[in-house]
Image (cartoon, helix red, strand yellow):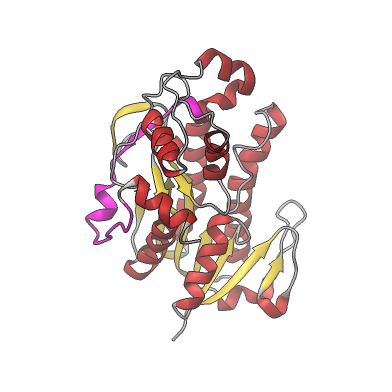
Amino acid sequence: MNRGVLITGASGLVGTALVALLHQRGYHVFQLSSTVHHPEKKIFKWDYQNNIFPDHIIPHIDYIIHLAGASVADGRWTANRKKEIYNSRIGTANFLFEKFCSNRKKLIGFITSSATGWYGNKSTPCNETLPAANDFLGATCLAWEEAGLQFHKISQFTCCIRTGVVLSSKGGALPVMAAPVKFFLGAPLGSGHQIIPWIDLDDLCNIYLHVIEHQLSGSYNAAAPSITSNALFIKTLSQFFKRPFWNFPVPAFFLRALLGEKSAIVLHGQNIDSSKIINTGYNFKFIKLFEALQNSYDGS
């Protein structure tokens, strides 16, 4: 029996790749979009603020993968922008929960995206038992996961995927990070010592599939099991694109002045421990950064 999977944020970088993988594996995939309505392709428009939802598809859903959320990288973190980042994750999760409860629909599983921003700025190993950091990203991740965990009332399992920097040439952080390198401006940001928890897009999609097929509950880190500093990341990018690497860091005060509170994205890092997902039987395809870059560009 082919199971039905509902994906929010399905038109994003991760969602697009995950839809393709699940189709390949024989799942019936239903996509929710804030802008597109194409029922023939099982793409349905939804709007949590105006109570717009395709209720008729609910009986066909066995799993929900919740990827929706405004980008933390776009624009300055004004009060309104932070509210949008927060509500686009927590508000949408609560809306889904209300819809499925009101329709008395039981699920096999609910899986929500989360982020390694949960841990704040840490150079010591971060496993899933650590509390959320006392900053904006930490508070957002905490509420994000709590909104997902309420689905345990109607699901056989619930799971949160704390995701690192997703590597793909098709979007996300990698093209932004690669741009200055391509223009011969590759240099560390801040101290350069902060650890970048990265993951290849293929590995991330396969982790979601692994969670579904093994019905994993709880929180799991999704980052390659390797320690890569910001300086090493930029140096490896420079080697990949055959460009010079300038070991003269961009000062942290300059980045704070330029980006404001959002500078935490580039100045903070996390030393992510991925042993929990590995111990469930998941094997990372890409552990070495250079090979992941080859897959991101040459394999795209």
Residue displayed at 36% across by 47% down: 290
Can residue 222 be seen here? The reply is no
Instruction: Write the start and end of the magenta stretch as one range.
Output: 266-286
**Outermost residue, bottom direction?**
1
Left-right relation of 246 to 175: left
Q: Answer above or below: position of 215 versus 77.
A: below
Residue displayed at 69% across by 27% down: 79
Q: Position of residue 268 (x, y in %)?
A: 44, 27
Can residue 198 be seen here? The reply is yes
User: Viewer-proximal residue, 261 or 181?
Assistant: 181
Q: Position of residue 30 (x, y in %)?
A: 60, 72
User: Viewer-proximal residue, 59 or 1?
Assistant: 1
Left-right relation of 119 to 250: left
User: Viewer-proximal residue, 227 or 5?
Assistant: 227
Q: Position of residue 209 (x, y in %)?
A: 40, 66
Specify the quadrant of the image occupied by residue 226. top left
Q: Is residue 17 magenta?
A: no
Q: Position of residue 192 (x, y in %)?
A: 40, 24
**Outermost residue, left direction?**
279
